Structures are given as C-alpha cells and as structure tokens.
C-alpha cells in the first residue's frame, strides 16, 4: 500500500472546456470501509472531460510513495472514450482523500451529484464524518491584480472631497509609495498561515471588492459566518465590520490576519516574520517607513491602500449634478419610492428629514429581521464572552460560531442591539450580491420582498421601523432600477450583466415573497418578555 502524506489542499486543472476540477485533501478518517483502491472509478461511459477526471483519480490512487501530491499540474490531453476502471493495490483504512469535482456537466462530488463515486460507501461515510461542509465549498483563490485594483482618482462626480481629506488620519498620511506597498500586501497570500489567502481573496476588485459568496472562505476551506463587505468607500465608515467592532481601517486589517477561519496566523508578529524574510519587503518597508517590517506599519500600509478605493461617478451622481438624462424614468421613480413608501430612508439616509445623495447609510445598527436564530438563548451563551471585551475572542466567535447572529449586541451589550447589524452603504450594490450580513438573499428583488413583507415580526428585537410596505411589483422594479443607478462607471458592464441575471431570476424564483403579509395589516409584535 503506498504511503500518502496529504497536504492541506491542492488544485489541478482539467483542460476540457472551461471546467475546473479541484482536489481537496481533507482531514477525514474513513474508518472500517474497504474500497478497491482509494478512489476506484466505476465503469462510466464518459466524454473527454470526465475521462480527464478518471486520469486524475488514477494518479491519486497510485501516488509516488512518501511524497505529497504536486500542485497545479496540468493533466495530459484527453484520451479516447473508454470504460476503463482504475484500481490500486491495497486498502486505506485511514485514507485522507476526498475529491471535490467542481465542474459543469462532468462527474461532480457534491451532495446532490448522481455519479458512481458519490454513491461509494467510503465517500458517503467520509461525508457523514465531517467532510460534508468542505465538499460543498469551492476553495478560495487569490485574484491577480487588475486595473480595477488601482487607486481611484479624487476627481469623481459625487465624491465628497472634504470628507475624503478628513478620512485620512494624521498619524498615517497618504504617500504614493505607502499605497503601493499596501496594494502589494493586499494581494499577497504570504500574509496567511499557509500562503493561500490574501485580503483580495475575500475582496476581489473585479467583484467590487467582495467575493460573491454568501459567507467567506478562508484557509483550508474554512467557512465563516459573515458575508464579506466591500472595501469601496470604507474610508468613510464610522465603524468597520458588520457589527462595528473596530473603528479604523488599521484595526480592521489586523483581525482577519489572526482569525483561524480567515488567514489563520497565530499572531500578527508571525505574519510579519514571514514577510521580513523577503528582501523585497525589507527594502520596501525601509523605503516607506525608514525601518524593518513590523506589525503597525504593515497595517498602516494596507489601510492606506484601502483609503484609495473611493467609488462614485455613478449615473445617479450625474443626475444629482444636473444631468436629467443620466438615469431613466424607472430609476427616478425608484428614488422617490426610496424616500417615501419604500421607507428605505429610515436607515439609508443621515436623517429622516434630509435625503442622502452621498453615503446612503445612517452609520447605525438595526435588526431588520434576517436572523433566524433564537437570539435570547445565544445571548445567554455569550454572556462570559461579552463580559471579557476581548476583541480578538469576539472576532473568532463571530466567524466561527452561531454567536455571529447576535450582531452588535456582542459589542455593545445593549438589548436594543440584539441581532442588529450595520446599515451598509448602497453604492455598487448591484454588483455585490448576495446580500445582508449572512449573504442569505441572492437578488435585490429578494431584499425588496423581505422588506415588503415586514421582515420577521416574530423577532422580539425587530427594529420598530420595519413594517409591511404594500409595494406592488412595478414599484419594486423601480427601486431596483434606482439601486442599479448607484453603480460606478468602472463597474457598468458587470452591473448590466448582473441586473439582467437578477431580473431573470426574479421572474421565476422569489423565495422571500409573501404577498399576504406585504398587503396585510401590521402584525402584532412580540416583545422580549412576551
């Protein structure tokens, strides 16, 4: 029996079509099962893509003794169709291989897949022993630097120039060299414990500095509890993270580096030690800061880069500046609904008396009825953690446990903040799906349906301003049109594509819609003591 030393996770690419097949080597114990080889592929009549998968499985089943699997090895060209079955000698009592096939049309090892491997007893048992979560996760990657990653100009229609200047802290002034260093660090996976995750993994410039996932994935495929908020315009935030647990971008940059679910470093010093061994970074830190690499300067550089990501110059900005033709009639109607019957202004404006054409957030925290947990029971569990006021411990709990559902309450200890989350800004919201702190809503139509029915009235901590809206379908469409008009010019093409995609989904799939509640009387509210 060959000795297999699995690495954390490796990827190989199938060249047939655009299918990407990932191999994840996971810490699973397959106990008491005997399979003819680690992954015998039962006879399948397959196309070229699946044939490549068979070759991949065959190579996994017969590894070189005592060696790790190589990474990013290109598979050989497709062989002719065949019904060949791969075998290997011996049986692995403690095998550690689970194949993740993530591809359209080919054999996929996902829970719903109907292929021979997915029906194998050893695979089913492995899933039952803890692999299920991993097997449904596409492992993260580090995007390459793209034009959208570059610092943004200050001369944009709608950009608040004075507020932008005020957002630069006196102890961390902007310089071009510091920003360049921060950009390099932002895309460098060597900040993470295993070199696979960078800041840009969860904040991709091509996705408006989000990741397109419901909740983010860190090292070793670990899945967090929160949706990745955009970095765009984060310099204007009064607090950072969904629960506002820190105030500055420097503080914000620290926590993902040391969170076991994100970048997984044991400490900031450990991350610095990895970079300090690299001559390029030694030179860059001395050039920018006049001293060797260190934690505070690393955070200053990343924060400086993030402060260059201002994103305005949207059609709506040009409309506000006087160009009546910059947005269509649907968006204009949506803007009026936003500030009237849609009640969006209750949270997405600086005050109820003045329309907000810049930030679209009150910088406060609200329970809008998304959480489906028993938050009272969770609050009892969290009592000791809350009393500790340990920001790092709270950060770990937020991303690793269901205590995440408590939101701002974990920070403030105020009952009014139970399951309350920060009001996000709405700029580029068209290209930052899915939505809410847990990424539970796929489209803007889902978001509108949620608010239209009044959230979850059975939540005793539901914000008092959440109530049924009785918006008809055309009014919902108009609000979405307005939200789409908040897209900055550099994301125009993505927004058009996403709008078409979401509109098509909205015509067939509306999981949040409840017309009876939307047009019914305001329901009786539960109270925390009822």
Image: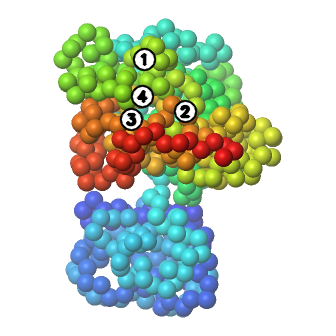
* Residue displayed at 42% across by 79% down: 118
Q: Measure how far apart labels 4 and 1 are at the Cα level.
A: 11 Å
Q: Which residue is mark 3?
A: 469
Secondary structure at badge 3 equals loop
Q: Measure how far apart labels 1 and 3 are at the Cα level.
A: 21 Å
User: Is 11 above or below relative to 114?
Assistant: above
Image check: 475 left or right of 9? left
**Which mark is nearer the camera, 2 or 4?**
2
Image colouring: rainbow
Give how far across and how far down residue 497 sits, in percent.
24, 41
Q: Marks 2 and 3: CB-CB under 8 Å?
A: no
- How many discs appear? 4
Q: Which residue is mark 2?
A: 464
Secondary structure at badge 1 equals loop
Q: Measure how far apart labels 3 and 4 are at the Cα level.
A: 10 Å
Secondary structure at badge 2 equals loop
**Which mark is nearer the camera, 1 or 3?**
3
Give how far across and how far down residue 383 sits, in percent.
78, 46
Image check: 247 left or right of 175? right
User: Is 416 above or below relative to 62?
Assistant: above
* Residue displayed at 57% across by 63% down: 8
Residue 202 marker: none
Question: Quick one: label 4, few (<14), some, or many (20+) residues within 10 Å?
Answer: many
Q: Which residue is mark 4?
A: 344
Q: Which residue is mark 1?
A: 356
User: Is 72 above or below relative to 476?
Assistant: below
* Residue displayed at 57% across by 15% down: 168
Give how far across and how far down residue 380 sits, in percent.
75, 50
Q: Measure how far apart labels 2 and 3 are at the Cα level.
A: 13 Å
Q: Marks 2 and 1: CB-CB under 8 Å?
A: no
């Amino acid at each position: 029996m060959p000795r297999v030393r699995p690495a954390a996770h490796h990827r190989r690419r199938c060249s047939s079509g655009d299918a990407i097949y990932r191999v994840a080597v996971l810490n699973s114990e397959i106990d008491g099962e005997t399979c003819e080889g680690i992954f015998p592929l039962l006879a399948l009549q397959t196309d070229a893509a699946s044939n490549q998968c068979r070759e991949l499985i065959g190579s996994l089943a017969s590894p070189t003794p005592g060696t790790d699997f190589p990474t990013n090895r290109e598979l050989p060209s497709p062989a002719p169709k065949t019904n060949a079955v791969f075998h290997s000698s011996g049986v692995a009592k403690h095998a550690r291989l689970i194949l993740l096939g993530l591809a359209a049309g080919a054999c996929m090892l996902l829970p719903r897949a109907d292929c021979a491997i997915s029906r194998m007893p050893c695979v089913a048992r492995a899933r039952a022993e803890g692999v299920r979560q991993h097997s449904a996760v596409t492992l993260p990657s580090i995007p390459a630097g793209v034009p959208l990653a570059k610092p943004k100009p200050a001369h944009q229609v709608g950009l608040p120039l004075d507020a932008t200047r005020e957002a630069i802290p006196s102890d961390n002034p902007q310089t071009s060299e510091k920003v360049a260093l921060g950009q390099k660090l932002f895309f460098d996976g060597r900040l993470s414990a295993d070199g696979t995750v960078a800041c840009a993994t969860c904040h991709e410039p091509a996705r408006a500095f989000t990741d397109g996932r419901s909740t983010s994935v860190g090292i070793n495929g670990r899945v967090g509890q929160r949706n990745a908020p955009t970095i765009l315009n984060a310099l204007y935030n009064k607090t950072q993270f969904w629960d506002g647990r820190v105030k500055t971008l420097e503080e914000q940059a620290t926590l993902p580096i040391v969170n076991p679910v994100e970048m997984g470093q044991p400490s900031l010093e450990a991350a610095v030690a990895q970079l300090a061994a690299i001559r390029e970074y030694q030179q860059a830190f001395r050039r920018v800061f006049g001293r060797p690499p260190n934690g505070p300067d690393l955070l200053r550089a990343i924060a400086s880069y993030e402060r260059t990501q201002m994103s305005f110059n949207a059609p709506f900005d040009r409309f506000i500046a006087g160009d009546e033709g910059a947005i269509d009639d649907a968006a204009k109607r949506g803007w009026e609904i936003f500030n009237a019957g849609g009640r969006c202004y209750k949270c997405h404006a600086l005050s109820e008396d003045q329309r907000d054409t810049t930030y679209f957030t009150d910088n406060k925290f609200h329970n809008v009825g998304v959480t489906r947990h028993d938050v009272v029971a969770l609050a009892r569990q969290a009592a000791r953690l809350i009393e500790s006021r340990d920001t790092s411990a709270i950060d770990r709990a937020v991303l690793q446990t269901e205590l995440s559902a408590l939101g701002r309450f974990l920070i403030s200890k105020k009952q009014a903040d139970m399951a309350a989350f920060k009001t996000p800004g709405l700029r580029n919201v068209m290209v930052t799906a899915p939505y809410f702190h847990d990424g539970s809503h796929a489209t803007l139509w889902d978001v509108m349906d949620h608010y239209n029915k009044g959230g979850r009235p059975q939540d005793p901590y539901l914000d008092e301003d959440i109530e049924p809206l009785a918006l008809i379908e055309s009014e919902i469409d108009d609000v979405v049109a307005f939200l789409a008009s908040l897209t900055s010019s550099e994301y125009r093409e993505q927004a058009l594509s996403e709008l078409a995609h979401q509109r098509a989904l909205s015509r067939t799939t509306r999981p949040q819609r409840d017309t009876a509640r939307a047009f019914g009387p305001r329901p009786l509210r539960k109270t925390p003591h009822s």
